Amino acid sequence: MITPHTMVPRPDELDVEFYKATVAANALCIQRCQECGTWTHPARYYCPNCFSGKFAFEKMSGRATIHSYTVTHFTVEPAWKPFLPYVTIVAELEEGPRIVASAKGMDPEQVAIGSSIRIVTENKSPEFAIFWAESGKGEG
Ligand SMILES: [Zn+2]
């Protein structure tokens, strides 16, 4: 049987570093400039604020709010068909950056812009993880 995420993407360039850090930490890690502190996602080779090339991937709290979302009622991707209708969220992290995550255990009718969510990661390979958005403020 085809199960969700049977096909695991293979990131390249800076995405490899982003995912490796996230997998190793078992938590979302976002690129941060080591000169000026600017968060950048997706990762870039140079800081968009000060153009420094010194950066690290730092662990996020996981606390976020729903900035935007969409409900998918039809998909051509077989792995996602059992989950229809599913919700894809643009999450605004407490630290500032935004990231796209899939809602987990959320009824589409429950989802509302501004709601508190928690971003958790699910490691799929040493170089790839999925981001889930769960209801609630979360901890730590
Ligand atoms: Zn900078």
Image (spheres, rainbow, N blue to C red):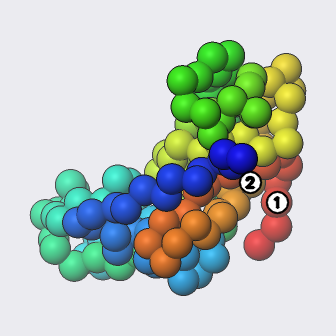
Instruction: Using the image, determine if residue 43 lies above or below residue 17.
Output: above
Front-most of residues 30 and 18: 18
Rendered residue at 84%/36% (across/down): 106
Q: Quadrant of the C terminus?
A: bottom right
Residue 113 is left or right of residue 38, and the answer is: right
- x, y percent for residue 16: 34, 70
Q: Secondary structure at mark 2?
A: strand
Residue 59: in sight, yes or no? Answer: no
Q: Residue furthest bottom?
A: 24
Front-most of residues 140 and 120: 120
- x, y percent for residue 58: 48, 75
* Cα–Cα span, label 1 and label 2: 5 Å
Q: Secondary structure at mark 1?
A: loop
Give the residue pinned by disc 2: 118
Query: Tag on residue 138?
Result: 1
Rendered residue at 58%/81% (across/down): 25
Amino acid type at image mark 2 = Arg
Rendered residue at 28%/76% (across/down): 55
Residue 5: in sight, yes or no? Answer: yes
Q: Are marks 1 and 2 in contact (CB under 8 Å)?
A: yes
Front-most of residues 121 and 67: 121
